[in-house]
Image: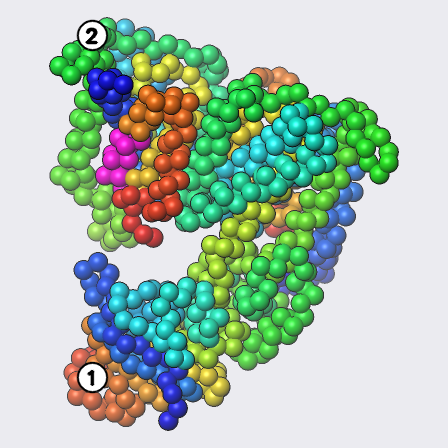
Amino acid sequence: MNAPLLAVENIVVKFGGFIALQAVTTEFRPGRVTSIIGPNGAGKSTFFNVLSGVITPSSGSIRFKGEDLKGTKQHDFVHRGIARSYQITNIFPDLSVHENVRVAAQAGRARYNIWTNRNRLTELDDRADAALDAVGLVAKRDETAKFLAHGQQRALEIAIALISNPEVLLLDEPTAGMGPEETKEMVALLEKLAAERTILLVEHKMKMILGLSDRILVLHHGQLIADGSPRDIQTDPEVRRVYLGQNDGYA
Amino acid sequence: MDTELILMQLFSGVALGAILVLTALGLSIIFGMLGVVNFAHGALFMVGAYAGLWVASLTGSFWWGLIVAPIMIGGFGMLIEYFLIRPLYGRSIDDPLLLTFGLSYVLVEGVRIVFGSDGIPFPTPSSLTGVVDLGVGFFPIYRIFVVGIVFLVVVLLWLGLEKTKFGLIVRAGARDPTMMKVLGIDISKVWLLVFGLGVGLASLGGVLSGPMRSVNPEMGALVLAEAFVVTVIGGLGSLVGSIVAGLLVGVVISMTALFAPEMATIVMFALMAVVLLIRPQGLFGKLA
Amino acid sequence: MTSPALAAPSHARAGKRAQFRSLVTRYRVPLSILALCLLPWLLPSKALAVNVLIYGVIAVGYNLLFGYTGLLSFGHAAFVGAGAYITGIAIGQFGVPWYLAVLLGVVGGALLAFIMGALSTRTRGIYFSMVTLALAQLVYYVALQASAWTGGENGLRGFTVSKIELLGFEINFLDPVNKYYVLMMFAALALWIVSRILNSPFGAAIEAIRENERRARTCGYDVERTKLLAFTLSGTICALGGTMSALHLAFVPLDSLHYLSSGMIVMMTLLGGASSFFGPFIGALVFLVMEDVFSLWTSHWQIIVGSVFVLFVLFLPKGIWGTFLTKVMR
């Protein structure tokens, strides 16, 4: 087994008196799909926000490739190699599809360049097109993002996250609001992406998770209550009790 | 510098601060409930002062002006909310701000047309002129009266917000407007009343400040800037913040006036800059 | 801005309009210079034309922040005024040559914009507008008190530039036509710079922040720093407008620092259309022509201008040019 890529230790997040995460410790090794599940309010989104720098935990540490991320600003997470998408579609609605991805691409080096014509930076264009190709949106490149179908907007969001070529990709419910057909396409895309990078997934659709994940973490009331292969999780009595027992977990 | 003079100036600062508290409270209540920063707040303060003057000269009594003008201008505020600001809900948060700014232009010019461009003296009511010896020094009766009135208004406001059903709705509605819909409360009526209340507070401030500074169409500009400084220091949307910061700014202004009069106005902006550096969300503001 | 993204150009006319849009965008700088060359001969007076030029530059610079970055500043009068005062003081009190005075004014305005931007971009949302207004009022009161330098309430006088040497030629700067075309070179420079900024990667970054600040941050943008740079650039262009106004009037009124002057810039920008390159300039033109026309028959022209502005916010928030582009040209 190789060294952990991302490791968290004793992460605690408090909002006022409410404890959203209590002492979560785990690590993620490269090249796998790990899903994080749990009932609503279990702390999944908070956990993602910690991993992507949106929230600074009240205590505990995050290490990425052995380096402590303490004090790293949110915008630097992506430069380090951790990118994410959001649960609610989060794109630049009035920019074209291609501009959406290109503006993300230039965040690396060209972000304070106020003088070069950006249409001459063909390397950025090529990278943007490659990312659009990866998510199957090349045909839509010149359309205004807000006019895309829901599933395509979700795919665009993933293209935006992919452009920095992140080692870790955090995807918060990439299939939220999708029908069966769109979900199938998204799953195919995720499988393709998983071949090249480490993916962490928050999802509700159990069938999809069980088929896609190498490993599943279960959060409940801000605590990590189970960690294992899909098979382990399915048979874990504690998980069955607090989570799978509520039948609505199955999509 | 003797202590008596310092005490007198301190008190004068409290009186100035009391007016600031009124204006900032109005601004803050409107923002807290509607999410609108009213850029016409200073202009409405000025219109309030003129309305007070007008009613007082019609009736021959300052007291009628003090009571009727805020109600009148508060009602006018409701019309503004209903016809001009309501169509903007759901649009950019900048739009109500831009609209009220344009409105302040119209109000200032309107007052110039009706009352002329020159300042008008606002006589102190005869029953409140003179000074009173409080043992530690002589204090102008009118300023004591202003502090008393503002104290009364703040207490009434506090009771209204804490003890009445309307207050409960206002406090809850500010936190979660959709919740109000679920409970079947007509939030738009609350908005109307809150906007009227905020504008009424500003115009009460206008009437009260009339005898302390002369009344002119441009007076609203400084008032708006002062109200912004106070709300930024106190924390936008925080009523306690408005009160504390209002008094603080008033005292700081008049103490500075004692030692370096030319710095009096400048120092309040500097105070705001310092607060921004240390605590951008304001003393009592919550982090976004 | 660069690639007009049309959802479905279903028929030929839509295609032609798209073509028109992209042509106008590509040649926006030469087109505006052409329009500026003709302007003094289309307006009733040369003085009005010079004013349009100056406020056009100011509004275009302001729009870099308001229209493109999405930050509603009510403090830009401070940079206009700083540019004007510094130029006036440099010429009147230190005898600095005019071109150096212009440079000093621009650099001074930029510095002030950087300081004010550093403070105000720490705040979010609606706070930003209030804080910029308050900080600019601080500058106003400082100028009021520092009357030894600024002339206080009476404004700054005594720095008339009557002759300008340019490339070996001596130009009579008191002649309105000469004055217009000299100042027009500055305006052309400003428009070219703003156009380049908008076409640059940074131009895309500020638009991204306007569109979706959270996403921009997640993409790896340092949102605060980007806003600060936009604020400073915008203030710098406004300071250039201020120095132009100082050269033109040979006078700096104290009111040029007041927040109502900031508000006037906001009004112009919105009247013309904040979401477009030409909008602010058109807004400045319309505003100043309105002022020119209405002030002929009433001294209370501001009530008309204010009402027109309120109606625009209610019914035409995209402004004249912005509405033309979206309603007619689509």
* Residue B116 on the magenta span: no
In terms of image quadrants, where is residue C293?
A: top right
Discs 1, 2: same chain: no
The residue lying toward the viewer, choosing from B280 and B171, is B280
Q: CA distance from mark 1 to mark 2?
A: 78 Å
Q: Given the image, what chain letter belongs to the residue carrying mark 2? A: B
Vertical placement of residue A229 versus B177, above or below: below
Q: Farthest front residue?
A: B1
Q: Are marks 1 and 2 in contact (CB under 8 Å)?
A: no
Q: Secondary structure at mark 1?
A: helix
The amino acid on which the numbered mark 1 sits, given as a three-letter code, is Val
- Residue C136 in percent (x, y) is at 48, 35
Magenta stretch, residue numbers: B238-250
Quarter of the picture holding the C terminus of chain A: bottom left
Q: How many marks?
A: 2
Residue name at image x 17 percent, y 30 percent: B156
Q: Given the image, what chain letter belongs to the residue carrying mark 1? A: A
Q: Which residue is mark 2?
A: B127
Residue B269, which numbered label? Answer: none
Residue A239, which numbered label? Answer: 1
What's the colour scheme?
A: rainbow
| Label 2 crowd bin: few (<14), some (14–19), many (20+), radius 10 Å | few
The amino acid on which the numbered mark 2 sits, given as a three-letter code, is Ser
Vertical placement of residue B225 versus B134, above or below: below
The residue lying toward the viewer, choosing from A158 and C100, is C100
- Residue B51 in percent (x, y) is at 34, 17
* Residue B242 on the magenta span: yes
The answer to whether residue B169 is left or right of residue B36 is: left
Residue C52 in view of the camera = no
Residue name at image x 77 percent, y 30 percent: C179
- Residue C246 in percent (x, y) is at 66, 29
